[in-house]
Image: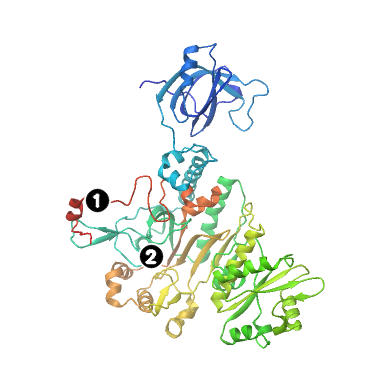
């Protein structure tokens, strides 16, 4: 089909272009007939422009335009005119002009689409994912991908300015335990052997430091076969960074510079650096999360000293067993009804709490169902320690250290949502540092790495690896934005003997270590520099910068929460011949 190529995009023309003869190409956004004059809006990635077909000017062209339907692909030629007074559309960048049609080519006709291609689309996510190429025509989604493109360009320019070099690492690699299941790829050539898709380029970027690359970055695809949710995908994108001869402060400074660029160039916002820092312990005990949302306050107060000798057996027993009694003040919510309080109690129980204790601070008194057990005097002491005011509501949880604070953390976020404390205009960035080196896997009765097995312990905690590894802290750090972990990293182990010791604590014996990580340990024999790095969740940062709620809205062809691609129906069965060639038999 022959058609005239465009002279301008659909978002380009302005009042200053009046009188020009132009050609636009794109999709019919919509068509309407107003008293014989037909108006169509032509849409492309750059915007929308209205075109007018008047039967008095060209009857044949008008009749041709009458057959147009949404999503037909057209080429339209004509003259740019000022819109008449009262017909200017201030909501369209091209709203001061329209085009009087003088030529029309219908390049391809469209079937009736399964949903309207509009930003206020009224269709399920499943249907939109099935017809993703239609969903991607929506201006709101196209705007997301323009922002994603900007992020790519900012990243590369920023790290290039700092003398980082971009190095590609393999997609087919050795399967190594890194916390999630690997996606495995069978080898046709090497019978019975498998590649793995990388969960991250962790070992490769460390090897690049051993290789003397000094400063590396990469925008890289990673793969994890894990349970999914709104902000997880089986394949996702990271900005991967590694540096030699650095400590934590160097990583913080370089990372904050990139975030400053993102906010300035994409949102026009100047963010303040350096970012606040909280240790893991302080984050948990103050906000109940290792990724706290600091857009609102509601800090926790621990009350063990006030309740350990009280008459309330529930609290006293928890403290005696080494647990915690803690809570927070909900401002001006003492007016909550019994049903509202029961609703909060049910929420806490769903999070694993045995119950929820509430205390109302009224003008007349301090009220609580536990008053008869704990006494008015202790209630007043709790009120004073928590600095509660008249009209406030106090919520308390008692259990083990991690359980108490985790439940309170979930309750804090729920209260924040209900009271509209989550202000989307705020951007709260902070570092969480000094994570535990290990945590205990109760099922396997062994230590597992909180971050990964290559993370260095804090130097002052090295003796604890021999005496009490559970108390050792890691030189690990996470970057948090509005309650979302957006980046994480660590200073790495660069000493072969220390790496072997950590493997041993993780239950990886010498034979297993050699089999899984022998290439890395071998490299450490030849002079490994001190090094550290960080990896950014590219999709998650893009989601937050665009104001979306799911990373699926910033990934061109995402999977569902069951790891399915509805558009091309993958994963799918393969031919028996392919399986036979790979020596695979489906049981």
Crowd band around label 1 with a 10 angstrom C-alpha radius: few (<14), some (14–19), many (20+)? few
Q: Which residue is mark 1?
A: 574
Query: Which residue shows up at 47% across the image and 53% down it?
Result: 538
Residue in front for this viewpoint, 282 or 240 = 282
224 displayed left or right of 264? left
181 shown above or below 32: below
Q: Is residue 12 visible?
A: no
In the image shown, does 85 or 128 lie closer to the viewer? 128
**Residue shown at the point (62%, 21%) measured from the top left:** 83
Please indicate whether residue 535 sits to the left or right of residue 296 in the image. Answer: left
In the image shown, does 176 or 568 lie closer to the viewer?
568
Q: Marks 2 and 1: CB-CB under 8 Å?
A: no
Residue 266 pos. (x, y %): 55, 45
CA–CA distance between discs 2 and 1? 26 Å
Tell which tag, 2 or 1, sits nearer the viewer. 1
Q: Residue at coordinates 55% horizontally, 79% vertically from top-left?
A: 400
Placement of 509 over or under 125, stated as above or below: below
Quarter containing the N terminus: top left
Quarter of the image with the C terminus is bottom left
Where on the picture, by quarter, is residue 318? bottom right
Element at label 2: loop
Sequence-wise first label, 2 or 1 = 2
Locate residue 156, reporting x and y percent: 45, 48
Q: Which mark is residue 180?
A: 2
360 versus 207 height, above or below: below
CA neighbours of label 2 inside 10 A, class few (<14), some (14 to 19), many (20+): few
**Residue 581 seen in render:** yes
């Amino acid at each position: 089909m022959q058609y005239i190529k465009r002279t301008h995009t659909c978002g380009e023309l302005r009042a200053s272009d009046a009188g020009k003869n132009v050609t636009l190409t794109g999709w019919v956004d919509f068509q309407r007939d107003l008293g014989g004059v037909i108006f169509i809006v032509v849409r492309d990635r750059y915007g929308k422009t209205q075109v007018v077909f008047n039967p008095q000017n060209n009857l044949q062209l008008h009749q041709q335009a009458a057959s147009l339907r949404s999503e037909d692909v057209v080429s339209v030629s004509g003259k740019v005119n000022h819109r008449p007074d009262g017909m200017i559309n201030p909501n369209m960048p091209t709203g001061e002009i329209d085009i009087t049609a003088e030529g029309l080519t219908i390049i391809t006709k469209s079937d009736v689409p399964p949903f309207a291609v509009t930003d206020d689309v009224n269709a399920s996510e499943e249907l939109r994912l099935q017809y993703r190429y239609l969903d991607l025509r929506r201006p709101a989604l196209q705007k997301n991908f323009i922002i994603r493109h900007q992020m790519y360009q900012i990243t590369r320019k920023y790290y290039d300015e700092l003398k980082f070099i971009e190095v590609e690492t393999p997609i087919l690699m050795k399967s190594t335990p890194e916390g999630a299941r690997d996606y495995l790829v069978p080898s046709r050539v090497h019978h019975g052997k498998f590649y793995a898709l990388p969960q991250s380029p962790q070992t490769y970027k460390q090897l690049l430091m051993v290789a003397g690359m000094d400063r590396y970055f990469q925008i890289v695809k990673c793969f994890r076969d894990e349970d999914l949710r709104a902000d997880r995908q089986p394949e996702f994108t990271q900005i991967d960074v590694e540096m030699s001869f650095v400590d934590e402060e160097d990583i913080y400074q370089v990372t904050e510079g990139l975030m400053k660029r993102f906010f300035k160039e994409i949102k026009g916002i100047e963010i303040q650096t350096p970012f606040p820092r909280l240790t893991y312990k302080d984050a948990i005990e103050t906000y109940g999360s290792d990724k706290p949302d600091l857009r609102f306050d509601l800090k926790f107060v621990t009350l063990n000293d006030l309740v350990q000798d009280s008459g309330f057996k529930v609290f006293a027993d928890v403290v005696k067993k080494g647990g915690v009694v803690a809570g927070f003040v909900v401002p001006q919510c003492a007016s909550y009804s019994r049903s509202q309080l029961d609703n909060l109690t049910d929420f806490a129980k769903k999070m694993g709490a045995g119950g929820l204790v509430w205390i109302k601070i009224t003008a007349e008194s301090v009220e609580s169902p536990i008053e008869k057990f704990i006494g008015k005097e202790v209630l007043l002491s709790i009120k004073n320690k928590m600095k509660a005011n008249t009209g406030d509501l106090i919520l308390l949880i008692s259990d083990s250290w991690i359980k108490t604070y985790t439940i309170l953390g979930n309750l804090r976020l729920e209260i924040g949502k209900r009271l509209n404390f989550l202000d989307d205009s705020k951007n709260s960035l902070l570092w969480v540092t000094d994570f535990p080196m290990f945590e205990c896997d109760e099922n396997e009765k062994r230590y597992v790495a909180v971050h990964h097995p290559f993370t260095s312990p804090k130097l002052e905690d090295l003796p604890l690896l021999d005496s009490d590894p559970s108390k050792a802290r890691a030189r690990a750090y996470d970057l948090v934005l509005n309650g979302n972990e957006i980046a994480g990293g660590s200073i790495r182990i660069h000493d072969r003997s220390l790496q072997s010791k950590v493997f041993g604590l993780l239950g990886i014996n010498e034979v297993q270590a050699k089999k899984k990580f022998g290439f890395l340990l071998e490299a450490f024999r030849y002079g490994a520099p001190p090094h550290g790095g960080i990896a950014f969740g590219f999709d998650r940062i893009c989601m937050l910068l665009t104001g979306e709620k799911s990373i699926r809205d910033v990934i061109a062809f995402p999977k569902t929460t069951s790891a399915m691609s509805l558009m091309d129906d993958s994963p799918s069965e393969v031919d028996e011949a392919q399986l036979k060639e790979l020596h695979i038999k489906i049981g």
